[in-house]
Amino acid sequence: ILAQVCSLKQLSFSPKGSQLLAAAVQAMSIFAGKKVLITGANRGLGLGFAEVLTRAGADIIACCRRSSEGLDALSPKPTIITLDVSSQQSVQALSSSLQSVGITSLDYLINNAGISSSNHPIDPILAVKADDIRAVMEVNVVGTIGVTQACLPLLAAASTKCVVNLSSMLASMDQCWGVQGKYGGVSSYRMSKAANNMATRCFSGELRDEGYVFVALSPGHVDTDMGSKGGRTPPLSVEQSVEKMVDVIANLSPADNGKFLNFDGADLPW
């Protein structure tokens, strides 16, 4: 929505235009001046978040192994922190890296960084390799938990205290049969995102009395390198998915703590 209405002169006075404007103004007022840390921010959904939230007036802390043309083109420029979520040493250094550039608080943490197995999206459980499981779990679960732990003191210093863990409908145990037309497969990724969902619930429970909001948020099936792997044609563009997710994030409240949500805000079954 924000991309569609960032230039007010493009809006008509139609009911739809008024709704788009209202949503954009709300998001911009919510994120203006807020510090948002995004992992995996150099491409795909992470870069999409950085672009949309920059337009909404947020101060972006972009964490990635290396920058990209898209990230470097943002204006105002984000604070770029070198982070390899697969490396415990890199994750453990995150707190000091943030302090070294003067980051003393965070309003939002978006744990976007994630990987899939070497033969994604096939990856049947009957043939899955232990090394693939370990690698995917290291990033999607262990890395996400480590980044969150490192950021908690900075989140505690802000009033918003919102953590968004990118999940997937493929993580849903209730709907694991038939998602994207499959009754199996994608096993490493499915298991890692289901574990990440449980980590979200654990954080939300242990910190429920301290004002945090933790959610697991599915972006839908999006046209990224991972989403289109195997010759698939995802129904959503990065921009479409991210704009809807930003609207969801803008409207989160303490009542949403611990929820598993779709990109359009609908509750998803665990």
Image (cartoon, grey):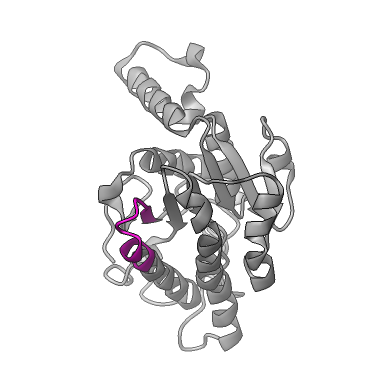
Residue name at image x 54 percent, y 81 percent: 133
Q: Is residue 113 left or right of residue 165?
A: right
The quarter of the image holding the C terminus is bottom left
Q: Residue at x 56, y 43 (%)?
A: 48
Q: Is residue 97 left or right of residue 133?
A: right
Find residue 69 and report its horizontal and vertical position in percent: 74, 42
The quarter of the image holding the N terminus is top left
Above or below residue 24? Residue 266 is below
- Tell me the residue at 45%/38% (across/down): 243
Q: Looking at the image, is 226 positioned above or below residue 69?
A: below
Which percent across, then down, holds residue 149?
Answer: 51, 64
Q: Is residue 180 visible?
A: no
Above-or-below relation of 13 to 266 = above
Q: List x then y, in percent, for residue 90.
A: 68, 66
Q: How many marks?
A: 0
Q: Which residues are magenta?
A: 201-215
Question: 208 or 214: nearer the eye?
Answer: 208
Residue 150: quarter of image: bottom right
At 54% from the left and 29% from the top, the residue drawn is 57
Q: Is residue 30 visible?
A: yes
Where does residue 52 sit, x and y in percent of width and height?
A: 53, 36
Relative height, residue 5 to residue 260 (above, below)? above
Quadrant location of residue 20?
top left
**Closest to the observer: 20 or 64?**
64
Magenta region includes residue 210: yes
* Residue 192, magenta (yes or no): no
Q: Can you tell which quarter of the image residue 103 is in?
A: top right
In this orientation, which residue lies closer to the viewer: 105 or 175? 105
